[in-house]
């Protein structure tokens, strides 16, 4: 079933104060170990085969990478879950699904697809903190998706799903989203993730265009083209968008010319755009050798169905992300930390630990490109992977509520 945009209305509304604290440092691997799977669907735990070697066994027709909202993504997720259950010598079959995310559009649809595919008893929590509003919860998708404007509502949700009859034990698969869920909580700390991405883009532009990089023009053009009016060409893909802005900044194609072609309906997909760049490069060989290298990598990825074609940008994003983890002094105020550090969401980590202690199978599944989460041979070989980087745990505590549930 396709999720509609509208909710089913407020389930409850209570005015609760919001007190956030710093709970010291931790890392994702403390709870998830290497059970972390990024966009390329190649698990970090190498005992689990990935998309490249097992696409057929997953029920996928080829090795092109499905995005989170696609049904093939759910097929892959189910396969990883069943393989992980075998790997941990658990004889009980999986029969329940929990999903924790920050986006009703992406995580909500991924949950719905997996629920439809498995027919397991299922529940989903979507968090998006709006601390200026009264605490509220909305139910979506046949009452299975609990969408809250407080991350601390996870404590109430735990009681809610137990009351619905979920066992939350060895039969339960728990999928946790990374960006803006367990790291950089949406509505609370997510701007730091966006800042890291932008900084990664700027460093890439500096290295490709050097002194010719016009940052003011880039900012204007990026903001304009990041809108839905241009999604036919950008596909709302940050790699496509960054590459388009690079080409425009190099003046290989003029911004006005680009906008005119999109508005006139002559340019309506990314493939067409890369062909346009290709022909411009042949008749007008301006730009650096590095620009040509970026262009060739983008073209090659397009042919192989790789949705993350701007590799050099994603490698810079990895570095700028790690730089913003655990970077604040431990006596910094919580406000400062939330503005300048990518923190772990305390409520999500408490919930995940509680579920793990009950015997649930936990998987971190993220649409994040692995290039922006794992070190690379050249520029970042000495950095640890993102899930092994310590950063502060910030949020409210739901531990007393969880302890009361057993
Ligand atoms: Mg997310």
Image (spheres, grey):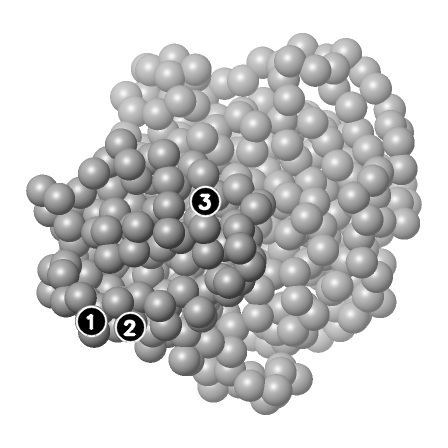
The foreground one among 305 and 109 is 305
Mark 1 near mark 2, Cβ–Cβ under 8 Å? Answer: yes
Q: CA distance from mark 1 to mark 3?
A: 26 Å
Depth check, mark 1 against mark 3: the one in front is 1
Residue marked by disc 1: 283
Vertical order, 45 against 385 (above or below) = below
Q: Secondary structure at mark 3?
A: helix
Mark 3 near mark 2, Cβ–Cβ under 8 Å? Answer: no
Where in the figure is residue 231, as x and y percent of width and height?
Answer: 55, 53
Vertical order, 19 against 294 (above or below) = above
Q: Secondary structure at mark 1?
A: helix
Instruction: Look at 48% across and 43% down and name the residue there.
Output: 226
Instruction: Look at 79% across and 62% down and name the residue there.
Output: 115
Residue marked by disc 2: 279
Quadrant in which residue 294 is drawn: bottom left
Depth check, mark 3 against mark 2: the one in front is 2
Q: CA distance from mark 1 to mark 2?
A: 6 Å
Q: Is residue 297 left or right of residue 124?
A: left
**Chain-order first, disc 1 or disc 3:** 3
The foreground one among 43 and 204 is 204
**The residue carrying mark 2 has its beta carbon less than 8 Å from ligand 1:** no
Where in the figure is residue 243, as x and y percent of width and height?
Answer: 33, 56
Q: Residues within 10 Å of mark 1 (few under 14, many from 20)?
A: few
The foreground one among 102 and 364 is 102
Q: Secondary structure at mark 2?
A: helix
Mark 1 near mark 3, Cβ–Cβ under 8 Å? Answer: no
Where in the figure is residue 100, as x and y percent of width and height?
Answer: 65, 46
Q: Residues within 10 Å of mark 2 (few under 14, many from 20)?
A: few
Instruction: Look at 56% across and 74% down and name the residue there.
Output: 87
Vertical order, 393 against 104 (above or below) = above
Instruction: Look at 37% across and 40% down and name the residue there.
Output: 221
Residue marked by disc 3: 225
């Amino acid at each position: 079933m396709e999720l509609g945009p509208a909710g089913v209305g407020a389930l409850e509304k209570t005015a609760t104060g919001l007190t956030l604290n710093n709970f010291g440092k931790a890392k994702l691997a403390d709870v998830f170990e290497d059970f972390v799977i990024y966009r390329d669907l190649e698990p970090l735990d190498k005992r689990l085969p990935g998309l490249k070697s097992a696409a057929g066994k997953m029920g996928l027709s080829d090795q092109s990478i499905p995005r989170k909202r696609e049904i093939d993504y759910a097929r892959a997720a189910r396969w990883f879950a069943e393989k992980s259950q075998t790997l941990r010598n658990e004889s009980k079959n999986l029969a329940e699904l929990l999903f924790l995310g920050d986006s009703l559009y992406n995580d909500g649809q991924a949950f719905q697809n997996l629920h439809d595919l498995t027919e397991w008893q299922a529940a989903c929590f979507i968090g998006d903190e709006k601390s200026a509003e009264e605490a509220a919860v909305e139910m979506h998708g046949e009452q299975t998706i609990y969408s809250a404007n407080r991350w601390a509502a996870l404590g109430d949700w735990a009681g809610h799903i137990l009351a619905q009859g979920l066992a939350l034990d060895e039969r339960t698969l728990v999928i946790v989203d990374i960006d803006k869920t367990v790291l950089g909580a949406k509505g609370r700390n997510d701007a730091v993730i966006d800042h890291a991405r932008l900084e990664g883009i700027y460093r890439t532009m500096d290295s490709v265009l050097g002194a010719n990089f016009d940052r003011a023009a880039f900012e204007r053009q990026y903001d304009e083209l990041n809108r839905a009016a241009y999604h036919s060409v950008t596909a709302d893909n940050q790699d496509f968008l960054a590459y388009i802005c690079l080409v425009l900044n190099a003046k290989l194609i003029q911004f006005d010319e680009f906008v005119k072609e999109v508005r006139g309906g002559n340019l309506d997909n990314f493939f067409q755009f890369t062909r346009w760049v290709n022909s411009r490069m042949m008749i007008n060989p301006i730009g650096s050798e590095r620009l040509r290298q970026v262009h060739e990598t983008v073209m090659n990825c397009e042919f192989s169905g790789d949705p993350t074609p701007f590799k050099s940008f994603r490698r810079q994003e990895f570095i700028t992300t790690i730089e913003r983890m655990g970077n604040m002094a431990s006596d910094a105020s919580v406000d400062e930390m939330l503005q300048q550090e990518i923190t772990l969401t305390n409520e999500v980590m408490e919930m995940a630990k509680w579920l793990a202690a009950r015997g649930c199978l936990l998987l971190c599944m993220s649409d994040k490109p692995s290039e922006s989460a794992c070190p690379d041979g050249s520029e970042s070989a000495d950095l640890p992977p993102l899930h092994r980087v310590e950063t502060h745990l910030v949020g409210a505590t739901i531990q007393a509520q969880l302890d009361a549930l057993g």
